Image (spheres, grey):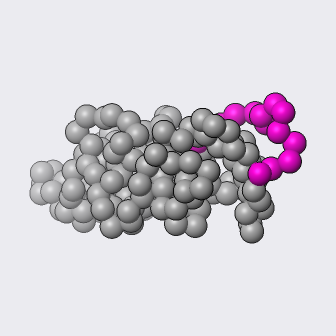
Amino acid sequence: MYNRFNFFKNTFAVFKKTEQPVGFIKPHYVSKHGSQYFFTNDGVYRYSNHWGRVGNCRWRLENIDHKQQINYWGYCSWQHFYNNEEGLPLYFIEKVSDNNYSYNHKKNGTQANVVYRSAADTAKILKKIHEIQENNSWAKHLVYINYTLLKDYFINQLLYSNKSFIKIKQEYIEQNK
């Protein structure tokens, strides 16, 4: 069980976006990067402008792009902190909104047919998905009729298989000769 004395040691958590908690004026702890922490018996409130990789932890703020430099309040109960061992296949990628994908911990959600990867491999796949969503240069040598269907096909292959992007591309080319 995690608590205020160990939640910051190699953990994964998805914080729920919230408003400033009532009754808390002075933080219990302020990190060297300015994040403020307010502890309760049930969990922790965090006020910060950086989410994602936090020291040796991976802390997401639900439905927020962690690269934004805007301060947000988040709350996570102690029971929703999980072990973060970088080299183990503990993470899967989930669609969190129409055009937004993020990582999640295998103990923090249920989704069918997901592929579990290490943190580094998950980050690489998320980067490739972002690239596919942002521009079409990756598809310039592919034959297709509907770019949206092509994009969805490649993203789904990345999500639900262990194939590399190159392997997916090779198979696609072979199937569409």
Residue at screen point 25% across, 34% down: 112
The x, y position of residue 6, in whole percent, is 55, 56
Q: Is residue 88 inside the magenta stretch?
A: no
Q: In the drawing, does residue 64 fall left or right of residue 71?
A: left
Question: What is the chief secondary structure element of the magenta stretch?
Answer: loop
Q: Quadrant of residue 167?
A: bottom left
Residue at screen point 38% across, 62% down: 85
Q: In the drawing, does residue 51 fall left or right of residue 141?
A: right
The x, y position of residue 118, in whole percent, is 33, 61
Residue 29 visible in the displayed image: yes
Q: Residue furthest right?
A: 25
Viewer-proximal residue among 135 and 33? 33
The residue stretch that appears in magenta? 14-28
Viewer-proximal residue among 177 and 59? 59
Q: Residue furthest top?
A: 22
Q: In the drawing, does residue 25 fall left or right of residue 43?
A: right
Q: Quadrant of residue 121?
A: bottom left
Residue 126 visible in the displayed image: no
The x, y position of residue 177, in whole percent, is 12, 54
Q: Is residue 25 inside the magenta stretch?
A: yes
The x, y position of residue 84, in whole percent, is 42, 58
Q: In the drawing, does residue 28 fall left or right of residue 44?
A: right
Residue at screen point 15% across, 57% down: 171
Q: How many marks?
A: 0
Compared with residue 48, is residue 119 higher up or lower down, i.e. above or below? below
